[in-house]
Each structure stands twice: as C-alpha cells, then as structure tokens.
Image (cartoon, coloured by chain):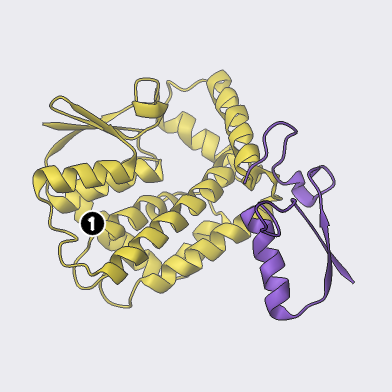
Chain colours: A purple, B yellow
Amino acid sequence: MLTLYSYPPLFGVADNNGYGLKVFAFLKLAGVPFRHEHIFDASKAPRGQPFCSSLQPS
Amino acid sequence: MLTLYSYPPLFGVADNNGYGLKVFAFLKLAGVPFRHEHIFDASKAPRGQLPYIVDGHDTVGDSETILGYVTEKYGVTLDAALIPAQRTINLLATRTLDDLYWVMSYSRWKDERYWPQFRDALKREHPSLTDDGLTKAKEFNAQRYYFQGIGRFEADAAMARGLADLAALANLIPRQGYVHGDRPTTIDAGIYGFIANIYFYDIETPLKEFVVSHDGLAQHCRAIHTAVSA
C-alpha cells in the first residue's frame, strides 16, 4: 500500500503543511488507499524538502 | 523626473532581470517619462532588491508596488477597462512568472550546461564584472535556490517546471493581439519582462527552445519589444 510521509497535524488538520495536506486530500478524494506517516525529519525525503530542526516551514 | 534603478542590459534587452524589464516595459507602454540607471549594486535599494524607482521624495521598491504607485500617481489607464476576472488572471500569471523567475535564474547560474555561456555574456557586455565577483554571485545564488527549493531539483526537473509555466503563459496569449485584447495592458509588460530574457538570449536552454517554437509567445515578445524599444 502507498505510504504518505508528511508533517504532523495541527488544529485538527491532517498536516500543518499545505503541500502535504494537498496530497492527503487528493488521495482521499481519489479514493486511493494509503498509510499516513507523520514525521518532522525530512532528511530521508527526496530533495530533503525544506525542514530544519528549529524552523519548520508551514 | 522618475528614475528607474535596475540591473544592466544583456543581449539587447534593457534589463537582464525580469522584474526590472517588466517595470521598464510598463513605463514605456504607459508613456511615463523616466531616466534609467543601470546598476549591479542593490545595497541602496529598498529591501536590497532591484528594481526600484525614485520619484521626487518617494523611493519605491518591488515591481508590483512600483506599477501600482505609477498607475495611481500618473493616472495610467492601461488596465482601466479590466474586469475582476481579468485582474484575477493577472495575479495568477504574475505568480506564475515568479515561479518562472527561479527556473530562469537556475538556468543561468546553476545549470552547468548554460552557466558558461551566461557568464561569458555577462563578462563580454559588462567588463567591470570580475571572475571573483561572479563566482561569489554564483555561490550566493546556489544558496538562494536551495532554500527556495528549486536548487534541490536536478537540472532537467527544474527546467520541466519552467516549461509548465511557459505552457500556461502561452495559453493566455491569443493568436491576435495581447492577453486582454487588441492593446497591451500591464500584464503584457510583465510577461515580456521574463520572456524577452529568454527569447533574445543566445543561450539555447529548453526554456528558449519552448518560446521559439511557440509562435504566440515569440510574436508577443517581439511586439512588446518593438513597442518599448522606441
């Protein structure tokens, strides 16, 4: 099964990052089953998309 | 008289930066007289960014803010007839050009296939630039690209992003005339600012290949170029 790695929720929203939430919503709308792994560490991500320990883009 | 401070020309284009060329073209299309000062040192500019204008006691930076300021102060009517839906298109297109900016800049300073040609053109047209200065600028830009995000893309993936931007812009330009009809409006100056800095360069990037092979974009660029070169 597909796994989505994205930032954690905030205020009841499934991902506090707009790009991650977009993918989450797309998968839901498309009816594609997936596991959702919430992480803060982007170091293993393709291109290590933006993250540093003290400053999280949102 | 209003003075526009912006980066220097390259390949016959009045400013090698899309934002400065946009303001230049806008002032020309609007018929607002101005002096054009070309500089490399942005340290005196508002936010340390070019272009900016000085008009009497006012110093105004940020190209969109400049266009708004000039439109208001000089009663520019280029966009007077536009309806809200057209103004929305303008905002979306302007943001698309912001995305294209990063890809264009990457193609010049980071894509090793084209960097040597860009560097040589700069040195040829602006002999005051030194290898040391250009190397520092290249390193600074690499940092900017990394933190903006485009710098994490492989060269072809970065170019693909720009090609998608260009395709969207090409779709905005009708077979005849300009984005919003028979006469140019402000958004045509914005599009020209970036497309001219691809189209007139003797550097065969994928971006240029796209513009050259899309008659609408190329023709639009030539038409505005003629209108602002007088």
Q: Is residue B111 visible?
A: no
Q: Nearer the viewer, residue B74 or B178?
A: B74
Residue B47, image quadrant: top left
Q: Residue furthest front?
A: A11
Q: Amino acid at mark 1?
A: Thr
- In the image, B27: left or right of B205? left
**Residue behind mark 1:** B226
- In the image, B99: left or right of B38? right
Q: Nearer the viewer, residue B101 or B16?
A: B101
Horizontal and vertical percent for residue B81?
A: 16, 67
Q: Residues within 10 Å of mark 1 (few under 14, many from 20)?
A: few
The chain under label 1 reads B
* Residue at screen point 31% across, 48% down: B22
Q: Is B141 above or below relative to A46? A: above
Which type of secondary structure does the marked residue at label 1 adopt? helix
Residue B188, image quadrant: bottom left
Q: Nearer the viewer, residue B156 or A12?
A: A12
Q: Is B170 above or below relative to A20? A: below
Q: Is residue B101 visible?
A: yes
* Residue at screen point 52% across, 34% down: B120
Residue B21, image quadrant: top left
Q: How many marks?
A: 1
